[in-house]
Amino acid sequence: MNDKMQKGLFEWEPKKETAKGGVEQVIECDRTPSAETTETVSAGTELAVAGTPDAVKALIATSDASVEQLATAVRFHNARYNDGNPAISDALYDALTEKLRAVDPSNAVLDELTTPAVQTPLHGKKVTHDVAMLSLEKLKKGEEFKSIALWLNGFRGDFIGSPKIDGLACSLVYDENGSLVVASTRGDGRVGENITENVYYIDDIPKKIAMGNVEVRGEVYMPLTAFRAYDGEKISARNLAVGGLKQKDARQTSKYGLSFFAYEALGQSFETDTEKFEKLRLLGFHTVETRRFAWNERRSVDDVLNEVRAYCDEMANARSKWNFDADGLVFKVDDNKTQQSMGTTAHHPKCAIAYKFACDSAKTILRDVLWQVAKGGTLTPVAVFDAVELAGANVQRATLSNVEQVESFPVCPIEWADSPELPATAEVNWPVAHLSIGDTLCVSRRGDVIPHVEYIVSSAPNAQKVGIPTQCTSCGSPLLRDGKFLRCTDPDNCPTTGQALIENYVKVTGMMGLGEKIIASLYDENLITLPSDLYRLTPEQIASAVQNGDDSIDASARLPQKLYQSIQSHRHLSLATFLEALSIPALGKVYSSLLAQSHLSIDEILQLDAQKMTDILKGRELTANKIHLALQKKRSLIQALLEFVTIDDEVSVPQNEGGPLAGMSFLFTGTLKSMKRDEAQKRVEALGATVASGVSKNLSVLVSTTNKTSKWTKAEKLNEQGAKIALWTEEEFLEKLKELS
């Protein structure tokens, strides 16, 4: 630890003055702190996954979420958390991982969470922890006390329980004189980020203690009294705490009113954690209240479990009175020698476990069920009920899974009606009933984040059953019952799905600047109804839509021209991107890539039967059938796009071996004056050539109406590297055709 305590690591000292009452207050520093932090993941990466809290909530709530989407999101947010730069709350992250675990329990991404994350380069200072800052093992929902029993069988001796603070793990290093020299985040557990300058503005972190050469660890958090100043904002106290510690100007940290709970002291010898906590309090640190549990040969596991269960209930009831967020409890072996003997995994110490509180819930009355049309034409039911306060937020709506859930919703068994702890539906034979307007419902915020209807408490007498629509609520087209789901039979022409179709195309292709408001304005003005219409837009039309979408924007400025250029710059797409942009629910990034790797053209892919599609998708028959049918329905959309878009992946076309151009490959770019591109392609194919959709070193001839295209430039560069691509103008191409005819 001494290497961290060298002079010069923290050279500035905050000035302090004594306020009324003798309390020291930090008022300013001698120089402006220079440490800056930047996010480790690019904006482009965030666009590719559920990177925001709202996007993650939507992903968790949807029944159509693919394993690939969930796995990608979990890996992304795990990396953000390990970097000390979380994009979502702990509760939402837990809900996301549980969703993936439920869908695919053996997914490889879940295994990655039990090993240290790969260090991601960050701007700013790094701090390497001498002793890894590990996470805690979380108990599986519904099996908490079974897991605690197994944990108890691994040792004998007293253990302690305490609230699990929902904050940001922090390390404080004090030198031989007891002066704070380095403060850092947990990071990936091995390497964290230097936040020393910011920590100096947290009043209840001692800057000098009566003990030298010690590392104190704990949680930086925002007291709820301070959090109330942010009432109404869609953020958590934890996220605000993170924001406070990430301020570029450290002096701004003081505005957040952050606090600190200590729970660890490294570098000093203690017999028990109880002794350690007492010493930390004597040094001036705040610690959470603990409860000691006796665990020895004179007691049975059941006796201890009953005591633990009562403690969990007591703490859950007391939670509303705390001035801090806590999402559960921590149980830890008290004796330090026993802790060391139990060892650790790569992810967590074996001497401690984390218990999660049950989610906050309340009873309310169902008033309506709305049917929202999602991308792809699937109708999602949304329950509307009397407002209730859950986990500090007013909740009036909750998304239901599908139409089958509306028809067969779980009803609370009578014997459990007044029980504070309901069993899981898998453990009890729950009756079901069709949802009715006026039903009394139990609703919750799972993980204190996602509104969820748990079950029907009671049904209103003579209540009207929730109607199942037969027509699309957006366009009026007939609905198709597809197992658990209702789908619009004309999604391509559905206003809601049409707009969603365009939004997805813009997102997948990477057209920068075209936000939802502008797209909605263009759509409302009937300037675009399909993705292909984007390429027909003029700068003037975009200017009008920009101003209508946001009247604070000057439509005469450069933005419309930039948007126009952004659209036009996306006329060349890879096959994988093109396929993913079609908004086919089953055809995401993974399967689009597999189809692209088959080296088939888009036309050839459209001609595939279901069996060949299954072979390419590695035996995923059900998925292949869905994609095959969807592609057939998208033919008109695809053809409309191909009028403007060139797929740049190289594609082989069967050769006419007897023709004079046999063995040669051609590529056409730009708009030909003498004939349509399709006709030109057919002409060279009839003469034995193949047609490519992208420039590569194997290309024989590039035909262009101008030498300023990106393909022409790429071909020139390849020729400089040794390729032999013939560059023909349209006139030269026509002359060659005459010679060969």
Image (tube, grey):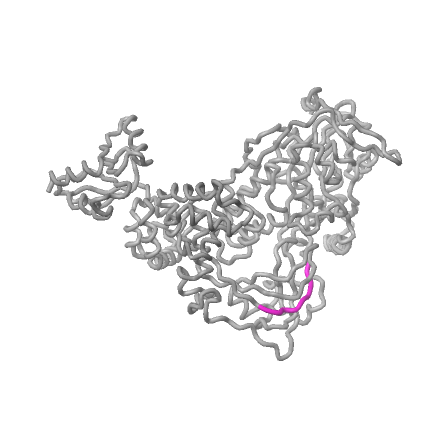
Q: Residue drawn 65% across and 60% down?
A: 395
Q: Residue drawn 17% across and 45% down?
A: 683
- Counting every numbered tag in the picture gives 0
Q: Quadrant of the N terminus?
A: top right
101 lies left or right of 596:
right
**Region in magenta:** 360-368
Q: Which residue is more in the foreground, 385 or 401?
A: 385
In this rendering, is residue 205 above or below 386? above
| Main secondary structure of the magenta stretch | strand
The spot of residue 498 in percent (x, y) is 43, 57
Q: Which residue is more in the foreground, 131 or 612?
A: 612
Q: Which residue is more in the foreground, 173 or 527?
A: 527
In this rendering, is residue 504 above or below 488? above
Q: Which residue is more in the foreground, 132 or 675?
A: 675
Can you name the residue that lies furthest to the right here?
Answer: 21
The spot of residue 200 in percent (x, y) is 74, 31
Q: Quadrant of the C terminus?
A: top left
